[in-house]
Image (cartoon, coloured by chain):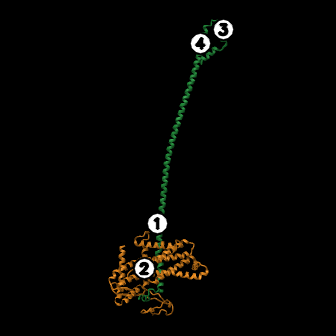
Chain colours: A orange, B green
Amino acid sequence: MRKAMVLFACLFAGTVWASSQAGEHGVANEDKDAEGEDVAGYILHHVSDSNEYEFEVPLSHNHIPIHLPQILIPLKEGACTPVADPHGGHGEVYPGLGAGCLDLSITKHTVMMWLAALLLIGSLMIWSNRDKTKLVPRGAGANLFEMLVLFVRDELAIKNIGKEEGPRYVPYLLTAFFFILFMNLLGLFPWMATATGNIAITCGLALCTFFVTQAAGIRAAGIGGYLKHLTGGVAPWLWPIMIPVEFLGLFTKPFALTIRLFANMLAGHIVIFFLLGLIFMLRNPAVALVSVPFAFGIYLLELFVAFVQAYVFTMLSALFIGMSVAMGHHHDDHHEGGASHDHGKAHHLG
Amino acid sequence: MFLPSVLAASSFVEVRPGLIFWTIVTFVIVLLVLRAKAWGPILSLVEEREKQIANAIESAKRERAEAEKLLADQKTAIAEARREAAETTRRVQAESEKFRDELMAKSRKEAEELKLSARREIEDQKTKAIAEIRAMAVDLAVEVAGKLINERMDDAKHRALAEQFVQGLPGATSATATRRSA
């Protein structure tokens, strides 16, 4: 526990140092409001995605920008010609998908996501290379890992989806849980960014759950049953109302997943940066006595939130899959009861 | 306020389709790799462990039940043996009692019989003795009578009586001889 606290303090110090760079940028500016804007701009720039990764050299003011490859696929002839920034910013930007240009550029958050994926796969490879003849887990890491795996299997998959169908979705839920957890935690390290604080990434993850949920529904009820479910089981003359409602209902679930994870992961970072930014905005070193402990508290809270949001995303995914699976057997009242009960719990947590 | 303008200019609320694409691709790859390399092994390992634990508990329960059954059997056997021993003792006791009673009854009966036979013998002897005495008395009486008769034979009156007596008892001499021999 003490070792862990030291580790968190070190990580936190790294984050504080990183944000001090923000303050130094702002000091030059005389206008107070403009300085605030500068700090805010720095923070939003820091949490935003970008086409370059800025490596902040320790103990210096240098930023080494690492340009990431831009991949632009024109869907129409000449669609990917740069245009002036519509927001009035400097330089040129590429037109969006609406204009026929598919931007598959590798960004800062893409790199962070891949890093998290590699770390996840690497650590699990190390785990799977241990002595397999021993059934009893040894050490805190192995025990924590197995505890989480069993938690996802028993408390999320089996409870929400059911004993028969649950095990089928365990690999998906485990991957979602650990992938999100690794991305969340990676953002707490110095020089790293939180990939899950990017709405496109959370949207992609939510879409995965969406696809799995629909596939589970079609698998359980068949195409006919799945389409019939979209009518809500009401009289045909109500279908014109019911079908749009049910159709929208399909998309509110992944939308809620997208926004919840994105907002939770982004908010903590912004709060930490603002607390530290206060020191520079108020130009008083004494502010640090208050804002640094506060920021450290938020940092520890973020560590907790990293686990909680991974859990909530996985739990809601399991719940949605469970609801889809329940489509196949409406007579199973117990299962539906269990699902709706957990639904209440989910809203409470979310 | 500066915030709206900052928000408008920043890209953090912008949804980049390319990033969604990369997310899904990465997720699917991670899912496939981990399902093959990590989740399969760990889940089967956990299941195997659960099975082993369940088996161990099951066998422990079974062995315990068996041991309890054995214990109960032993207890029953001991109780049975104890009961049998008690039964045997009781039976032996009863038999010996019965045997003693029988023996007593038999000896008593024998004694009774002995007494009876002795009494009968005494009675017999008594009867025989009385008969003998009686016979002797008759002889004596006859002798006495004979003597009395001989002395008064001179008398003509007695002479006639004796002659009449003798005529009346033709086998008198032989009868007296028979009695004497008995």
Looking at the image, residue A346 lies above or below residue A110:
above
Per the image, label 2 sits on a secondary structure element best described as: helix
Q: Is residue B123 left or right of residue A196?
A: right
Tag 4 secondary structure: helix
Labels 4 and 3 touching (C-beta < 8 A): no
| Labels 2, 1: front one | 2
The one nearer the camera, A44 or A98, is A44
What amino acid is labelled 3 in the image?
Answer: Ala
Decide: few, some or many residues near mark 3? Use Cα within 10 Å; few <14, some 14-19, many ≥20.
few
Q: Which residue is mark 4?
A: B143
Protein chain holding label 4: B
Task: Write down the chain letter for disc 1.
Answer: B
Rendered residue at 42%/74% (across/down): A127
Q: Which residue is mark 1?
A: B53
Which x, y percent locates residue B182?
59, 19
| Residue identified by numbered label 2 | A184
Query: Do dots 2 and 4 share one subunit?
Result: no
Q: Amino acid at mark 1?
A: Ile
Determine the CA span between mark 2 and mark 1.
35 Å
- The answer to whether dots 2 and 1 both sit on one chain is no
Q: Is residue B1 above or below residue A321?
A: below
Decide: marks 3, 1 in contact (CB < 8 A)?
no
Residues tagged 2 and 3 counted as in contact (Cβ below 8 A)? no
Disc 1 or 4, which lies upstream in sequence? 1
Q: Earlier in the sequence, mark 4 or mark 3?
A: 4
Indicate the position of residue A177 as horizontal and vertical percent values.
Answer: 46, 77
Residue A322, image x and y in percent? 52, 75
Crowdedness near tag 2: few (<14), some (14–19) or many (≥20) residues, C-alpha within 10 Å: many
Disc 2 to disc 4: CB gap under 8 Å: no
